[in-house]
């Protein structure tokens, strides 16, 4: 999946049974990755899998990463890339 352009406001990609939707993430912006994971699981159920950035990605830190409940995607600044898109 490729994201092009920059969102006007924070959003997240929600995928459910092959259906995709960009949802408002304003309530998640500024939260830690643990808090973001907990809030999204509360909204979408405990079986939801979450990949998120934290405050370092939002601040475009070049060493920021993507966090999952099982690990990280690090060493490439993906968190800063997603933060720059507000996604």
Image (tube, rainbow, N blue to C red):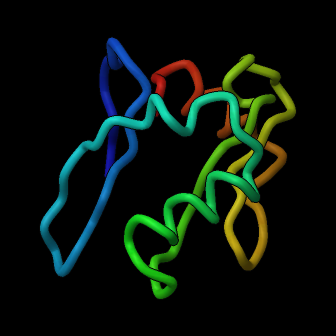
Give the side of residue 22 with respect to residue 77, left or right.
left
Task: Identify the residue shown where x is 71% and y is 30%.
Answer: 57
Residue sticking out furthest to the top: 8
Task: Identify the residue shown where x is 34% and y is 50%.
Answer: 13
Task: Identify the residue shown where x is 18% and y is 81%.
Answer: 17
Give the side of residue 26 with respect to residue 66, left or right.
left
- Decide which of 83, 9 is in the foreground and name it: 9
Measured as percent of width and height from the top left, residue 16 is found at: 23, 73
- Residue 24, quarter of picture: top left
Give the side of residue 50 with respect to residue 68, left or right.
left
Residue sticking out furthest to the bottom: 47
Give the side of residue 16 with respect to residue 73, left or right.
left
Quarter of the figure that contains the C terminus: top left
Task: Identify the residue shown where x is 78% and y is 71%.
Answer: 71
- Decide which of 47, 43 is in the foreground and name it: 43
Measured as percent of width and height from the top left, residue 58 is found at: 67, 24
- Decide which of 48, 79 is in the foreground and name it: 48
Measured as percent of width and height from the top left, residue 69 is found at: 70, 74
Q: How many marks?
A: 0
Q: Is residue 82 above or below residue 51?
A: above
């Amino acid at each position: 999946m490729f994201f092009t352009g920059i969102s006007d406001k924070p959003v997240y990609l929600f995928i459910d049974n092959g259906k995709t939707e960009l949802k408002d993430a304003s309530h998640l912006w500024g939260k830690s990755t643990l808090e973001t994971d907990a809030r999204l699981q509360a909204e979408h159920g405990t079986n939801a899998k979450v990949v998120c950035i934290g405050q370092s990605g939002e601040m475009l830190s070049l060493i920021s990463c993507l966090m999952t409940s099982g690990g990280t995607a690090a060493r490439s600044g993906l968190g800063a890339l997603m933060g720059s898109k507000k996604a």
